Image (spheres, coloured by chain):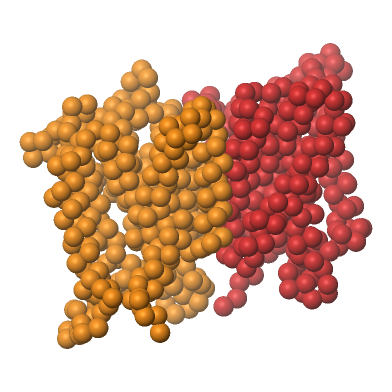
C-alpha cells in the first residue's frame, strides 16, 4: 500500500512539473492560436540564462531572476517584431513550423552564449525527503517537488486573477475569442502578443528553474516539451485548469504504469505511455477534457 | 526567350494531360534524367554518394511520402521516424530470414509492411484532426522506437541491439554490405525513386489524389459530395507509409548498413522530414525533392564554410549551424510560406515573359 501511495504522490508531483510546462503552451495558444513548439526550448533558454548570469556575475538569485525575466521579455518582443508580425493570417501549420525554427534559434543562441555543458541551479531550494511522511508512513516524497507544486499553485492563482480581473487579462481573453472583433474595439494585437509571450516566457523561466534544480540545466530540458504535449491534448489546448488536471493524470498514470505494467513488457514504457493514454482518451473526447467543443460547419 | 510555349499545339487528349505540357520542360527533365542515370554513375566516389547523393535520394523518398499525407491529404504526422524504423526492421527481418529474396522485393515488401502499420496508426485520424492528430502520431513514433529497442526478435537478439545489413547482390553486383560499389547503391536508389515519383505524380492527379485534396481542403464538405473519409484518409496513410517505409529500408540496407533505432529513427528525423516537406512546398512532388536537397546540402555547406572558411571550432560551428538553420527556416517561411516549389513556379512564370515582361 505504501508503494502505491508513494507512486501516486510522486506521480502527482511529476504531473505538476509537466503542467508547469503545459501552462506556457496554453497561454500562447489561447491568445494567438499558435501552437508554440519552442516552449520547451524557452524553458531551457530561461534556465540557461538564469544559471549563466548567476555563474558569471555571482549576483544574488533575485537579481538574476529579474534580469532573466527582462531577457525573456526581450525575446518576446523580438519574436513578435521579427517573426509573428510577418506571419499574420498564415495557416496554423506555417506558424507551428516558425516556432520550431524559433526553437532552433533559441537553442543555438543559448549554446553559443552560455556553452552547452550541464549547469547546476543552486538557489537554496529545499531538497531531500519530507521527514514527517518518511518517519511516520515510510513514504518518500522529495521536498523540491512539494515546493514546485506550491509554486505551481501560486502561479496558476496569479494567472487566474490576471486573466479574470485585470484590464490586460480581459484584452487577452478578447483576443483569444476573436481577433477581428478585438481589433475593432481598439485592442492592439501586437501589444497583446508581446505581453502573452512575455508571460509565457516567465512561466518557462519558473518551469525551467524547477526542472533545472531537479535534474540540472542541459539540453534534455527542452525535450520535456514533448512530454507536455499529451498533457495538453488530454486537458484541451485552450484550458488552464485542463493543463493542470491533464498534467496530474499523465503524471500519475505514467508512474503507475511504469510500476505495475512496466515489468510485464520490459520496462521503460514511460516514454510512450503518456501518448497512448492521451490517444485512447482522444478517441472518446476529441477536444480534450476541458477544451471548447469543436463545432464544424461547411 | 527560350522558355516559351508559342507554337506548341496539343492535338490529342493524351498531349493535353501530359505531366509536362511544355516541350522545354520535357526536354529538361529528360536531360536531367540522362545526366543522373548515364553520366553521374561514372563519376561518383564514396564521399559523394555517402555524404550527398544517397541521403538526398533517400530523404527525398521519405519527404515525398510525407508530402502525400501532409501536403495532399492534410493530415499532420510526426511519426515519420517511427515508420522509417518499421521499414528498416522489416527489411532486416526479411533479409535475414529469406536470404534468397531479391533486394527489390525486400524493399517493396518493407514498404508494404510499413503501409499496414501506418494504416493502423492512421485510424485515429478519423476522429481527431490538426494538432491533436500530430500529437497522436507522436504516440506511434515513441511506441515504435521503444518496441524495436525492447523486443529482441526484431534485432535477432544481437548483443548490441543494433541491426546490420548482410551482403546482398542484385544482378551480380553487390548492393549492401561494406564492399558494395557506390555507383550500384546510387543507381538502385535513383531507379526506385524515379519510378515511385512517377507513380506518386500520377496518383495525385488522378481520382484518388483529388479525393485527398478534397479532404484536405474541407473534410465535411468533401464528405457531403460523396468522398468517403475512411477510405480516403486511410489510403493516404497507407501510400504515405509505403514510401516512408521504403525510405527507411533504403536508409538502413543501402546507406547506413548498421542502425541503432533511437539514433537513426528518433523524433528529430520526424521533424527533419517535416521540415523538408514544408520548406520544399506542401502539396508538390518536386517540392519534396527541393526541400530534401535544401536540408541535406545546407548543413554540409554551412559546416564547410564555417570550419574551413572561418576557422571556427567544430563545436562552436555546430551551435552556429543550429542557429542558422533556425533563422533560415523562419526566413523562408516569412518570404515564401508555400515553399521552394512556389518560388520555382514563380521563376518559371517570370521566365516565360522574359525579356519582355509586357
Along the viewing direction, whichever of A259 and B320 lies nearer the viewer: B320
Tell whether A284 sits left or right of B219. right
Along the viewing direction, whichever of A283 and A54 lies nearer the viewer: A54
Which of the 4 image quarters holds residue A218? top right
Which of the 4 image quarters holds residue B253? top left
Identify the chain drawn in red.
A
Whether residue B67 can be seen here: no
Give the x, y percent position of residue B75. 48, 59
Which residue is painted at 50% across and 77% down in the image?
A: B221
Q: Is residue B147 above or below residue B65?
A: above
Identify the chain drawn in orange.
B
Along the viewing direction, whichever of A173 and A288 lies nearer the viewer: A173
Q: Quadrant of the N terminus of chain B?
A: bottom left
Q: Quadrant of the C terminus of chain B?
A: bottom left
Q: Is residue B252 above or below residue A231?
A: above
Which residue is painted at 51% across and 45% down in the image?
A: B325
Which residue is painted at 40% across and 39% down in the image?
A: B300
Tell whether B116 sits left or right of A203. left
Give the x, y percent position of residue B14. 18, 79
Amino acid at each position: 500500500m505504501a508503494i502505491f501511495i508513494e507512486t501516486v504522490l510522486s506521480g502527482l508531483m511529476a504531473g505538476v512539473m509537466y503542467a508547469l510546462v503545459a501552462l506556457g503552451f496554453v497561454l500562447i495558444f489561447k491568445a494567438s492560436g499558435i501552437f508554440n513548439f519552442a516552449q520547451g526550448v524557452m524553458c531551457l533558454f530561461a534556465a540557461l540564462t538564469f544559471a549563466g548570469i548567476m555563474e558569471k556575475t555571482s549576483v544574488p538569485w533575485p537579481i538574476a531572476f529579474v534580469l532573466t525575466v527582462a531577457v525573456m521579455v526581450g525575446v518576446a518582443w523580438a519574436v513578435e517584431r521579427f517573426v509573428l508580425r510577418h506571419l499574420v493570417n498564415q495557416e496554423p501549420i506555417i506558424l507551428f513550423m516558425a516556432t520550431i525554427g524559433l526553437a532552433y534559434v533559441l537553442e543555438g543562441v543559448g549554446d553559443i552564449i552560455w556553452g552547452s555543458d550541464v549547469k547546476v541551479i543552486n538557489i537554496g531550494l529545499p531538497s531531500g525527503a519530507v521527514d514527517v511522511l518518511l518517519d511516520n508512513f515510510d513514504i518518500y516524497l522529495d521536498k523540491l517537488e512539494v515546493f514546485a507544486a506550491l509554486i505551481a499553485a501560486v502561479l496558476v492563482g496569479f494567472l487566474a486573477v490576471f486573466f479574470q480581473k485585470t484590464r490586460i487579462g480581459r484584452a487577452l481573453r478578447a483576443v483569444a475569442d476573436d481577433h477581428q472583433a478585438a481589433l475593432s474595439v481598439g485592442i492592439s494585437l501586437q501589444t497583446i502578443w508581446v505581453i502573452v509571450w512575455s508571460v509565457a516566457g516567465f512561466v518557462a523561466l519558473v518551469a525551467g528553474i524547477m526542472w533545472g534544480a531537479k535534474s540540472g540545466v542541459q539540453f534534455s530540458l527542452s525535450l520535456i516539451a514533448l512530454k507536455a504535449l499529451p498533457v495538453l491534448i488530454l486537458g484541451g489546448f485552450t484550458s488552464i485548469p485542463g493543463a493542470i488536471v491533464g498534467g496530474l493524470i499523465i503524471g500519475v498514470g505514467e508512474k503507475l504504469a511504469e510500476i505495475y505494467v512496466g515489468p510485464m513488457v520490459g520496462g521503460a514504457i514511460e516514454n510512450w505511455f503518456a501518448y497512448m493514454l492521451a490517444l485512447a482518451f482522444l478517441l472518446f473526447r476529441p477536444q480534450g477534457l476541458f477544451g471548447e467543443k469543436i463545432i464544424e460547419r461547411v | 526567350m527560350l522558355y516559351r510555349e508559342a507554337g506548341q499545339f496539343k492535338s490529342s487528349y493524351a498531349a493535353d494531360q501530359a505531366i509536362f505540357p511544355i516541350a522545354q520542360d520535357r526536354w529538361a527533365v529528360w536531360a536531367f534524367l540522362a545526366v543522373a542515370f548515364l553520366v553521374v554513375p561514372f563519376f561518383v566516389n564514396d564521399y559523394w554518394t555517402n555524404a550527398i547523393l544517397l541521403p538526398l535520394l533517400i530523404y527525398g523518398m521519405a519527404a515525398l511520402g510525407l508530402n502525400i499525407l501532409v501536403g495532399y491529404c492534410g493530415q499532420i504526422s510526426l511519426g515519420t521516424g517511427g515508420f522509417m524504423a518499421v521499414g528498416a526492421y522489416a527489411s532486416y527481418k526479411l533479409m535475414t530470414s529469406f536470404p534468397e529474396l531479391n533486394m527489390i522485393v525486400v524493399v517493396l515488401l518493407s514498404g508494404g509492411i510499413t503501409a499496414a502499420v501506418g494504416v493502423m496508426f492512421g485510424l485515429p485520424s478519423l476522429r481527431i484532426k490538426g494538432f491533436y492528430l500530430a500529437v497522436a502520431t507522436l504516440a506511434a513514433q515513441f511506441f515504435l522506437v521503444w518496441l524495436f529497442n525492447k523486443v529482441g526478435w526484431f534485432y535477432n537478439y544481437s548483443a548490441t541491439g543494433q541491426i546490420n545489413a548482410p551482403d546482398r547482390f542484385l544482378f551480380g553486383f553487390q548492393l549492401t554490405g561494406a564492399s558494395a560499389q557506390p555507383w550500384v547503391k546510387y543507381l538502385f536508389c535513383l531507379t526506385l525513386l524515379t519510378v515511385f515519383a512517377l507513380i506518386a505524380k500520377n496518383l495525385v492527379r488522378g481520382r484518388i489524389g483529388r479525393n485527398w485534396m478534397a479532404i484536405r481542403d474541407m473534410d465535411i464538405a468533401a464528405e457531403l459530395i460523396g468522398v468517403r473519409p475512411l477510405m480516403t484518409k486511410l489510403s493516404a496513410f497507407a501510400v504515405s507509409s509505403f514510401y516512408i517505409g521504403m525510405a527507411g529500408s533504403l536508409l538502413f540496407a543501402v546507406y547506413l548498413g548498421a542502425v541503432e533505432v533511437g539514433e537513426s529513427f528518433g523524433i528529430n528525423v520526424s521533424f527533419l522530414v517535416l521540415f523538408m516537406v514544408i520548406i520544399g512546398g506542401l502539396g508538390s512532388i518536386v517540392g519534396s525533392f527541393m526541400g530534401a536537397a535544401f536540408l541535406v546540402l545546407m548543413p554540409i555547406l554551412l559546416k564547410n564554410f564555417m570550419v574551413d572558411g572561418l576557422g571556427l571550432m567544430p563545436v562552436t560551428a555546430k551551435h552556429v549551424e543550429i542557429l542558422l538553420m533556425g533563422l533560415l527556416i523562419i526566413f523562408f517561411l516569412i518570404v515564401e510560406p508555400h515553399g521552394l516549389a512556389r518560388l520555382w513556379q514563380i521563376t518559371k512564370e517570370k521566365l516565360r515573359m522574359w525579356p519582355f515582361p509586357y
